[in-house]
Image: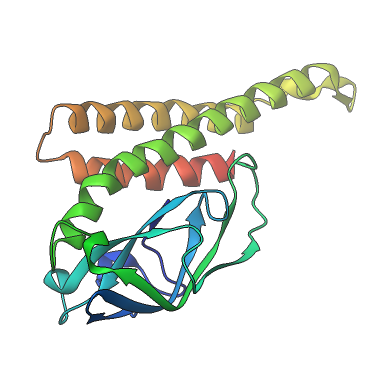
């Protein structure tokens, strides 16, 4: 699992309050990460912590193994869908992590996070697209057999047209973002963010 998000903060603002101080041979960490996919079941957690000053260069990446003293978990989040993967807060309280668990050296955490974040956005976008597509199909089947005011509900097609449009446009932007990421185009990061925004909003609306 990857620990980026903190409650009431956006990682992109670089406002990580997750504190870390180097104490040879360990790094002492405390605070928490929110909305972590795979929390409680993952054996390894890649955590972004602030080890330096403000900005991207003050962030480092640490590997924290499950079972490390001070590592604990909050209650599982209640989610609308995607029930197969648990999501929860991960707490780090006086959690001593060996310095050798730092990945990429001091201040490399932001670069590491960005390399993985685009793929994660495609993953979430694709999951949302699949859920929207299935929801549309189930709705269509249901409306085909339900009647109101003497006609099948499927004949009220305007809402279905809106839903279909959302599914199709989501599929297009997800594919475009995935292609840009595979080809390492300069537009990849922006397209991945757009795909996640559009596909998740569309899924919720559908």
The image shows residue 54 at horizontal and vertical percentages of 17, 80
* Nearest to the observer: residue 171 or residue 19: 19
Looking at the image, can residue 15 be seen? Answer: no
Instruction: In the rendered view, tell whether residue 159 sits above or below residue 58.
Output: above
Q: In this view, does 99 lie to the left or right of 173?
A: left
Picture quarter with the C terminus: top right
From the viewer's perspective, is 123 left or right of 118? right
Count of numbered circles on the image? 0
Taking the spot 53% from the left edge, 55% from the top edge, the residue there is 39
In the rendered image of this protein, does residue 122 appear above or below residue 12? Answer: above
Residue name at image x 13 percent, y 67 percent: 107
93 on left or right of 137 = left
Q: Is residue 187 visible to the viewer in this orientation of the structure?
A: yes
Image point 49% across, 34% down: which residue?
A: 127
- Classify residue 167 as left or right of residue 153: left
The spot of residue 8 in percent (x, y) is: 45, 75
Q: Where is residue 176 in the image (x, y as percent from the top left)?
A: 26, 28
Query: Coloring scheme of the render?
Result: rainbow
Residue 130 coordinates in the image, percent (x, y): 53, 28
Q: Quadrant of residue 188?
A: top left
Residue at (14%, 61%) from the top-left corner?
108
């Amino acid at each position: 699992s990857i620990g980026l998000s903190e409650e009431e903060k956006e990682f992109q603002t670089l406002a990580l309050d997750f504190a870390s101080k180097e104490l040879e041979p360990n790094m002492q960490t405390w605070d928490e990460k929110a909305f972590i996919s795979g929390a409680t079941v993952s054996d390894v957690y890649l955590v972004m912590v602030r080890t330096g000053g403000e900005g991207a260069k003050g962030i480092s990446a640490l590997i924290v193994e499950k079972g490390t003293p001070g590592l604990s978990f909050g209650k599982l989040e209640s989610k609308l869908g995607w029930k197969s993967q648990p999501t929860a807060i991960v707490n780090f309280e006086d959690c001593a992590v060996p310095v050798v668990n730092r990945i990429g050296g001091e201040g490399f955490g932001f670069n590491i996070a960005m390399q993985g974040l685009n793929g994660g956005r495609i993953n979430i976008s694709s999951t949302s697209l699949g859920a929207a597509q299935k929801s549309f199909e189930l709705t269509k089947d249901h409306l085909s057999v339900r009647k109101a005011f003497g006609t099948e509900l499927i004949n009220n097609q305007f809402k279905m047209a809106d839903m279909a449009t959302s599914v199709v446009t989501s599929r297009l932007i997800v594919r475009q973002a995935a292609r840009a990421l595979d080809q390492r185009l300069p537009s990849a990061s922006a397209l991945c963010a757009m795909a996640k925004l559009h596909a998740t909003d569309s899924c919720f609306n559908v």
